[in-house]
Amino acid sequence: MIFKKIIDSGLIFGIIIVTFVISLAIVTVVRDGKDLRVGLFGIEQIKNQRTPYENPTDVDRSLFRYAPGFAILQWPFMLESKMYQPFKFVNITPSILAWYWTQVLLLALSAKMLLRLIPAPSKEIGNHNLKLSFLLTLPLIGYELANCQNKIMALFFILAALLLFKENRLFISALLFSLAITVYIPLVFFLLYFIIRKKEYIISFIPAFLIVFVAVPSLFFGFEFNNFLLREWFVRTLKPFSLTTSYASYIDLRASSQSLPSAVGKLFAFGKTWQFTYLLPPVVLHFIIRISAGLIVFFSLLAAWKGRKDVFQGLQYAIFLILALLLPQYCIYYTWAWLFVIYFAVFNYIGRPETPADQKAVLRILAIILIIGSYSIAVRFLNNISVLFWTTLLFWLGAVATLMLPATRKA
């Protein structure tokens, strides 16, 4: 009832959003650009012809884990910031504010795109569902913004790519998709969705990928140095997870990480700072993770293939966003700020008159469980047993089942 009153009153909702955005700007400055410093460190390293993938404070774990092109996207936000030692800056406040307000703008544009990308049964229902989804995700969005993270930018690029894809503007879509994976590589799973829907997308994606990852960075950094950075990026950040035969090479048991590898590790491994005790051999854990990830991808593709009609697209987007949350080496819970897209998709689907009543009931229950799971991040013990991961996986199962049931294949 409280949410309904807030949503129905444009004035109250507006006051809440304005208060949230302004107060969060203050909090963000007080936190002093915690994660923005990683990006600015990377820029400083590249400016000095050094690899940004080395971490002077922890040689075993890179903090700058992005493709070299991400430094170009973040370069304008250096402004007056000066690094006097790794991850320590003076005059960083203008950079923090510029980055914060840019993310707020991208979030607003993402919300606007959602109304076109996932049509609701009516304009009124769409606006209601968007407001409700945003309110339910407000703590996660706040945590994402206050940390000066970049997942809102990644979300903006992938939503823009999906919208242009829907409008059959494939090359521009592929460019924006390439920018999305420059910011957050796990979004690469969407390539499978694009190809399933339109096989010719790969023809646009290949040149777009080369432009974003090779051509443009080479103009800024030089061809040889960009090649060096690409190799460093692969060797130091991608290879230890993607090309390995043992969980020991990528174990991450941080309470804040809620991805599949971390959730499995928390069940069968203990310890910290590389002093781990395993209940199962690391090779066996690696096998469990890889088989589980393969099954999740397979059934996601099957659901995307079976649910071809427009009425299913919102749930398909939700499924592939969930892949980018669950399957990386690690994923910190503030990335679940993307839940506002997932909630919007499921609320719109539930609101359709042709959706069977039993599916509406099941999806409502799963959405409530996921909402509870998302608030569980406030309790460290629940993070240690990966409640957010398991509730997200349960929701994914429900979405996949919904797409694959013949009863949902209505026009």
Image: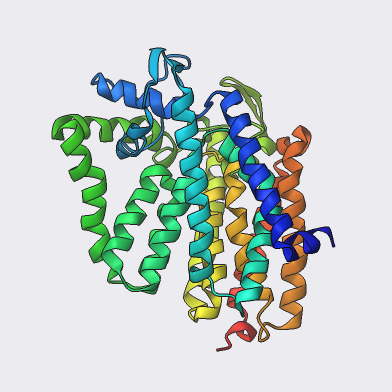
Quadrant of the image for the C terminus?
bottom right
Quadrant (top left/top right/bottom left/bottom right) for the N terminus: bottom right
> Residue 128 or 387: which is nearer the viewer?
128
Task: Name the residue: 34% across, 49% down.
Answer: 179
Figure disc tally: 0
Quarter of the image where one finds residue 76: top left
Q: Is residue 147 above or below residue 81?
A: below
Task: Identify the residue at horizontal 56%, vertical 55% (top origin).
Answer: 322
Task: Residue lying at the far top in this picture: please name it.
Answer: 84
User: Picture coordinates of residue 251 (x, y %)?
Assistant: 55, 32
Q: Is residue 148 left or right of residue 143?
A: left
Q: Position of residue 90 (x, y in %)?
A: 44, 15
Q: Does residue 298 appear anywhere in the picture? A: no
Instruction: Say which quarter of the image contains residue 402.
Output: bottom right
Residue 277 horizontal/vertical position (percent): 64, 25
Residue 160 appears in which quarter of the rendering? bottom left
Q: How is the image coloured?
A: rainbow
Q: Is residue 100 left or right of residue 162?
A: right
Q: Residue at x 39, y 50 (%)?
A: 180
Q: Is residue 246 above or below residue 18?
A: above
Is residue 324 positioned above or below 204 on the image? above
